[in-house]
Image: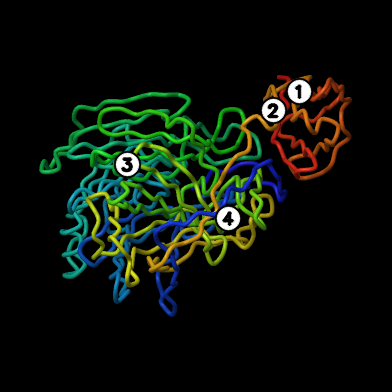
Amino acid sequence: MKLKMNLLPLLAFLLFSIGAAQSQPFQIALHPKTGMQLPAIQSFAWGNFGDYVFLFGGRTDGLHRRQPVFSFAASGNNTQVYLIHNRTFEVKSFSLSLLPSGIQEQLQSTNMQFAQYGNYLLLTGGYAYSATQANHITFPNLTVVDLEVLYSAFQQNANFSQAFRQISDQRMAVTGGHMVAIGDRFFLAGGNRFDGRYNPMGGASYVQKYTNSIRSFNLNLADTQLTILDFQEWTDSLNLHRRDYNLTPFRAANGHTKFHIWSGVFQYGVDLPWLNVVEFDEVSFQVIPNFNQYLNQYHTANAVLYDSATQTNFTLFFGGIGQYQYQNGTLVRNDSVPFVRTISCVERKSNGVMAEFELPVQMPGYQGASAEFIPATDLQGDEHSVFVLPPSIKDSILLGTVYGGISSTAPNIFFTNTGTQSSALGTWTDVWLKPGKATAIPVKEMSRVELDVFPNPFCQFLQVRVPEAFKNDYSFSLLTMHGKKLELPPIKQDGNSFQFDFSQVNIQGVLFLEISSPKGKSLIKLIHNCN
């Protein structure tokens, strides 16, 4: 579930330099499996038992449509529980209609948070139509699945419901966040509560509230009657105000496992991704200084490698949706936040210094959004699937699989989406580590104040400050959110500062200012609001 607003078929260039290409101690190769009939699904939850993968919830259609009557329709809910053997690819399934109504409704929702603890899989929240509530809701439930019992039920065609336990708790009503287990404690990070019919076209058809928090709790899984114990919450209305992001583990220099909360959406006042990154463990959280993530900003398949010789973590992101991407060697900023084919890597060294790279391989199409990475069962990783690189890679190593997600026919389809421009994928794409070193392109920003646009949102006056060296070489265009060019308001220049007077511009809401210079173009999203 993307709940994505204001996509435009427009490109924008921001002023960046490209640093010298660098080598990384591995290569990545993608090998899609062909000729298999696997369930097409996106925004799902999964767990594994031996050589088997269980799939729960998610959607069987593509990117949600803008029209409320079509968006997140119940007909696109995944109403099956699937069991897939990850080597023979045999598929078994059973209908959720065999389960009690409360479990049945939650488990056909999209974007549940999930975490595996031994053979137990915990599922919280999720968004879908609830027949009992006669409305779309975020489910206030926590469901525990005993995967061993469920596997036996599949094999013996026994009572499936014996594998499930569920409790209701409003604190679990979250969608679009992530959940992890650290020791015996569970952490529910970010996300939001979204109740009502999704509607980007105006009108009060829903209520949305971000959690702005990391919630944590204990759970006695041996108790038949589940009880949430020792509930705690860290709140930060700025840095934890995000959903549809990526959460990954990393190994700190002292060997301790921590977690990255990557960019995600949306910033206050403008529908653009966050760029900063947060780290946390069981003790505290903090914003990582001096680093922004520019590539692969929505939830997508991801994997983590660790080089013990250099104590470096490598986090891989496979396609998805992003505000920035490389095109012909130039880093492009696109405030319409399109689907991308980029595969990127963020390095984190032992001293905490981070750097971002584009890898020299791409997804086979506009894929990866709302997909999951399923590690290979014989992968030598830790309990959080951080794969430790061998001293040298002499033979190809199966790292895991990118499964499911959304496939789009074009980068920007939101305003033209009739339901046929994207679809859910049933593709099993193996990811291999190959011998040799990869040449990667580092993301290196020239200046964080190359262009300064303020205030934003604004009412009458908008100020644009540009680099002094090019103050006489800039031109401007004003566009609507549909790409229609408008007459520019009066401009007053003072050195390298331009002031726009919007007092006679009647269109309010989202506008785009296209700024052209000798170095390229930038397309900046504006919020014109005089209410």
**Marked residue nearer the N-terminal end (1 or 4):** 4
* Label 2 – label 1 distance at C-alpha: 8 Å
**Marked residue nearer the N-terminal end (4 or 3):** 3
* Label 3 – label 1 distance at C-alpha: 42 Å
Between disc 2 and disc 1, the foreground one is: 2
> What residue type is disc 3 on?
Met
Between disc 4 and disc 2, the foreground one is: 2
Location of residue 318 in the rendering, given as x and y in whole percent from the top left corner:
47, 57
Instruction: Quickly name the residue at label 4.
Output: 340
Instruction: Quickly name the residue at label 1.
Output: 463
Which numbered dot is residue 179?
A: 3
Q: Residue at x 28, y 63 (%)?
A: 53
Q: Residues within 10 Å of mark 1 (few under 14, many from 20)?
A: some
Tags 2 and 1 touching, CB below 8 Å: yes
* Label 3 – label 2 distance at C-alpha: 37 Å
Q: Is residue 511 visible?
A: yes
Instruction: Quickly name the residue at label 2.
Output: 452
Between disc 3 and disc 2, the foreground one is: 2
